[in-house]
Image (cartoon, rainbow, N blue to C red):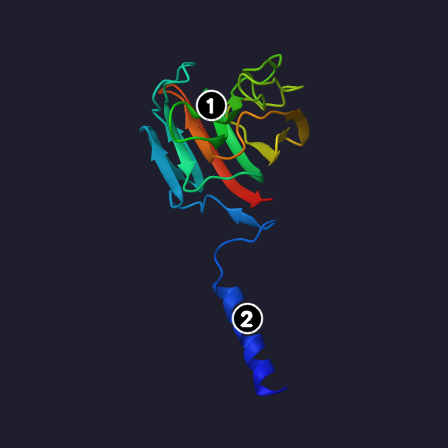
Amino acid sequence: MNLIRAFTILSTVLLAGCRTTPEPGESSVLFNGRDLDGWVVMHGGEWTVEDGALVGREGRDWTTNPELSGSWLRTEKPYADFILELEYAIEGNSGVFFRSALEKNPAFTGYEMQILSDHGREPTRHTTGAIYEVVGATRNMSKPAGEWNRARIEARGPRIRITLNGETVVDVEDKRSASGYIGLQNHDDRSVVKFRNIRVTEL
């Protein structure tokens, strides 16, 4: 092996080891299980890390007025096309925002996947798995209050697919927003929500 080739291989290995930004198609961890590193608190609410889970309490009450915003936690950067995977446990009301703006209510500037402790309820545009005020889930796959659920949100251009506990419950095209922040809702002072194993793959 000549000196130039050896130097080229060494440089490639070192650069690969130093790269911290995932390439398109690579999955990256959004929550490290220890602290709020990588997240930004919006409009108050209490966020803590307990037993490796991100826990939201004492949020500010929400309203359906799109001019107002309640408490939420958001990523540091916006995302356009992606696959978001996470687990959550809920007692009360919460949601997962995506492609949302910083101003006004993220449920309306972008999208909100609704999550509630509503096991057994008939699905509507406001029950678990729905894209809030856009389309209802085909089936309510929510587990009983306090149990862990698995969710997957895939956004590719105008097409959005939501899979909850292994079943696709939303498959729709909508052009409200093409890019924005991923966020976790802290709905009110009567709800407790937990999130863990949060990963995103940029497409």
Q: Which mark is residue 13?
A: 2
Can you tell which quarter of the image residue 64 is in?
Answer: top left
Tell me the SS state at disc 2: helix
Specify few, some or many for label 1: CA neighbours under 10 Å numbering under 14, 14-19, or 20 or more: many
Looking at the picture, tell me which residue is in the foreground, 44 or 121: 44
Sequence-first tag of 2 and 1? 2
Q: Give percent across and percent down for residue 140.
A: 62, 19
Residue in the image at 60% along x and 18% along y? 135
Secondary element at image label 1: helix
- Disc 1 residue type (three-letter): Ala
Task: Tell whether 52 sits left or right of 157.
Answer: left
The quadrant of the rendering that contains the C terminus is top right
Which residue occupies 60% across, 81% down? 5
Residue nearer the viewer, 200 or 24: 24
Q: In which quarter of the image is residue 68?
A: top left
Give the position of the N terminus as an image quadrant: bottom right
Q: Is residue 65 above or below residue 20?
A: above
**Could you say which disc has been placed on residue 107 in the image?**
1
Q: Distance between the residues labelled 2 and 1?
A: 43 Å
* Residue at x 40% of width, y 39% of height: 50
* Labelled disc at residue 165: none
Q: Which amino acid does label 2 sit on?
A: Val
Image vertical order of residue 27 relative to residue 161, above or below: below
Residue 95: x and y, percent?
Answer: 48, 25
